[in-house]
Image (spheres, helix red, strand yellow):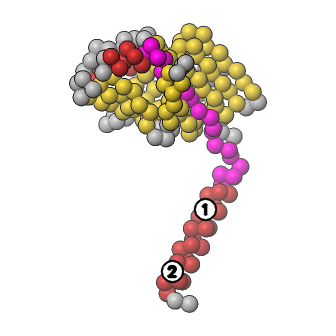
Amino acid sequence: MSRTFARVAAAAAGLALSVTAASATSASAAPAAGNAVIHESNAFFQQAAQAGIVAVPLPTATAGYDSASGLSASFPVTNGSGSLAEFWGSIQFGGGLLFVDARTGSAVAFRQLAFSSDTYQVVGVPDGSTTPVALFTPAGETVVTRTGTTQNLSAASLALDPAGAQFLDSKLRTSFFTAGQSVGTFTVTYTPAS
């Protein structure tokens, strides 16, 4: 057996052992699952476009479009605990959200997106910071249902949070964003880790 083959075999065996050990410790726990979807209404999209502003989902989020409901961004659930119906806990999402103002040439990206059941806010951490900013608040008719362990939230409106509107106006050097402005609708489908 050559030395190279022996080294490769030893490395593969070590990797297999570490994967087996990791899977043995996590095999009993299923990760949180689901997604959150922000549907940007056609009305908000047109107003923002006229002001030179675009919001784009960042990987691992995905974008979509429907002529009736407008643009959408779907964010996968990556972690979370708590209850939507009982107003406690937090759900973390993958991906990010980028806001660009073409007129001022300014941009700001948010990562570590989460929905706080305690405060009923969608929050994100802007690049270059460690402090979350409250971006949106579900508004209008909000319905929470449960099917088995899966929880669902559907909000007829998703409004800009005052802190989010102020932060976006400041970072993008615009006066477009206003507190309470409806950007569209919001849904969450969430199964807690078990």
Q: Residue at x 60, y 26 (%)?
A: 188
Residue carrying label 2: 7
Q: Residue at x 51, y 27 (%)?
A: 65
| Quarter occupied by residue 79 | top right
CA neighbours of label 1 inside 10 A, class few (<14), some (14 to 19), many (20+)? few
Amino acid type, residue under disc 1 in the picture: Val
Residue 31 vertical placement versus 88 (above, below): below
Residue carrying label 1: 19
Residue 148 vertical placement versus 176 (above, below): below
Q: Residue at x 29, y 25 (%)?
A: 101
Depth check, front residue: 39 or 24: 39
Residue 75 screen position, x and y as percent: 53, 34
Depth check, front residue: 109 or 43: 43
Instruction: Let me know if residue 24 appears in the view.
Output: yes
CA neighbours of label 2 inside 10 A, class few (<14), some (14 to 19), many (20+)? few
Q: Which residues are magenta?
A: 25-44
Depth check, front residue: 68 or 107: 68
Residue 12 screen position, x and y as percent: 57, 72
Kindly state the secondary structure of the residue where label 1 is placed.
helix
Depth check, front residue: 13 or 61: 61
In the picture provided, is 100 more to the left or to the right than 4?
Answer: left
Q: Residue furthest right?
A: 148
Residue 173 screen position, x and y as percent: 25, 21
Residue 134 screen position, x and y as percent: 43, 22
> Are the two marked residues, 1 and 2, in contact with CB atoms closer than 8 angstroms?
no
Q: Residue at x 70, y 30 (%)?
A: 150
Which quadrant would the N terminus be assigned to in this image? Answer: bottom right
Which quadrant would the C terminus be assigned to in this image? Answer: top right
